[in-house]
Amino acid sequence: MDIVGHRGACGHAPENTLKSFAKAIELGCQRVELDVHLSKDKIPVVIHDPTVDRTTNGAGAVRELILEELKRLNAGEGEQIPTLLEVMNVCRGRVDLQIELKGKNTPRPVAAITQEHWDPKRAVITSFDLSLLDQFSSLMPEVPSGLLSGDSALDLVGLAEAHGHVWICPRFNIVTTELVRKAHAANLLVYVYHVNVRQTADKLVEWG
């Protein structure tokens, strides 16, 4: 079982900041999860929402702000919105990365940075958007990829298998023993997110 720090250690530090990723490493996470959008000048930046409104003292869409403008914002406790490369520099050799593709047109620039600055064996690419996953996999097939699902299981196993993705990433509340059984039968790994209660974690471990 791997413990994944969701947006770093967002219960201890502002989410998706360098401070949060450093804290996740300190707490012993095997992997950190992060979200990527593109700035107006096409730089992959690490932020969950399509706007800066919730997590910073600014306002506006990430895609409408250049990196210099994004860097002026306070993402909490004086932290900046980091670039993907800055996160890689903090995490390299210390923890694996789970990179969620959020914004349109993210696959190519994320693949370029990953190829040049990160060990493909220590990365996984995920997304709710199957087309983004497929685009990334066509560029870097050596990097494992996983399909995310929220409150609906859809046909996670069938879709992942048909498109050559090796993970399924369901939200904890839709996981069943049958879903886990089907995933394992298809040689897929199951990574569950938003597991914040110990009893839930223990149950999921028991299910495999």
Image (spheres, rainbow, N blue to C red):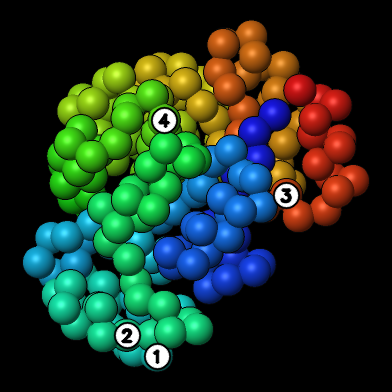
Nearer the camera: disc 4 or disc 3 = 4
Residue at position x 32%, y 30% from top? Answer: 119
Label pair 1/2, CB-CB below 8 angstroms? yes
Point out which mark residue 73 bears.
Answer: 2
Point out which mark residue 122 bears.
Answer: 4
Residue at position x 57%, y 11% from top? Answer: 186
Element under disc 1: loop
Point out which mark residue 195 bears.
Answer: 3
Residue 46 visible in image: yes
Disc nearer the start of the sequence (4/1): 1
Point out which mark residue 57 bears.
Answer: 1
Disc nearer the start of the sequence (3/1): 1
Residue at position x 20%, y 43% from top? Answer: 113
Residue 134 visible in image: no
Q: CA distance from mark 3 to mark 1?
A: 29 Å
Image coordinates of residue 141 in percent, x first then y, are: 27, 21
Q: Nearer the viewer, residue 173 or 188?
A: 188
* Left or right of 20, for residue 100: left
